[in-house]
């Protein structure tokens, strides 16, 4: 299973499917779900030439159950580490519930301009 070690040593689980040079979709799940919640959308987009990435937020699913770092800023730092590790560029971000707020904060902290946010 694909994991990355984060700055504090926590293990973050992620999925990375589809064409590596296709348009990138990054999915963030709601609480208390995990990346499996996006399987149908990921399967569809990957089969249509896209690269799709989703993670299990720390404390959720297959990611490490940490005592610290369970706040939105830490979660967005985790996303940034994953984005850098995978070399993702020009992503379309899709979030549900907590995942939507997490991605809004991610974009705001990096001065990115999402075109549309729908929850």
Image (tube, rainbow, N blue to C red):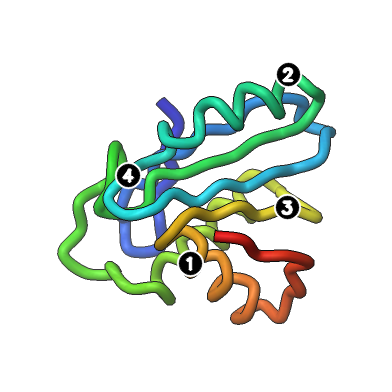
Look at the numbered discs 3 and 4 and tell me whether their residues touch, using CB distance below 8 Å: no
Q: Which residue in the structure is indicated by mark 2?
A: 47
> Label 3: how many residues lie within 10 Å, few (<14), some (14-19) or many (20+)?
some
In the displayed structure, 38 sits above or below 75; it is above
CA distance for labels 2 and 4: 24 Å
User: Does dot 2 land on a helix, a strand or a loop?
Assistant: loop
CA distance for labels 4 and 1: 14 Å
User: Does dot 4 land on a helix, a strand or a loop?
Assistant: loop
Q: Which residue in the structure is indicated by mark 4?
A: 33
Residue at 66% from the left image edge and 77% from the top image edge: 110
Residue at 40% from the left image edge and 56% from the top image edge: 6
Residue at 80% from the left image edge and 55% from the top image edge: 90
* Relative to 84, 58 lies left or right: left
Furthest residue in direction front, as rendered: 119
Q: Which residue in the structure is indicated by mark 1?
A: 102
**N-term mark: 3 or 1:** 3
**N-term mark: 2 or 3:** 2
Q: Position of residue 80 (x, y in %)?
A: 57, 62
> Label 1: how many residues lie within 10 Å, few (<14), some (14-19) or many (20+)?
many
**N-term mark: 1 or 2:** 2
> Label 2: how many residues lie within 10 Å, few (<14), some (14-19) or many (20+)?
few
């Amino acid at each position: 299973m694909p994991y990355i070690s984060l700055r504090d040593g926590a293990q973050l689980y992620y999925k990375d499917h589809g064409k590596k040079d296709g348009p990138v979709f990054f999915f963030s799940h709601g609480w208390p779900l995990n990346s499996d919640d996006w399987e149908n959308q990921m399967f569809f987009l990957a089969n249509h030439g896209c690269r799709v990435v989703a993670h299990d937020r720390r404390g959720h699913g297959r990611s490490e159950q940490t005592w610290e770092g369970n706040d939105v800023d830490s979660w967005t730092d985790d996303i940034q580490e994953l984005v850098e590790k995978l070399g993702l560029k020009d992503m379309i971000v899709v979030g549900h519930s907590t995942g939507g707020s997490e991605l809004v904060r991610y974009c705001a902290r990096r001065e990115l301009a999402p075109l549309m946010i729908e929850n």
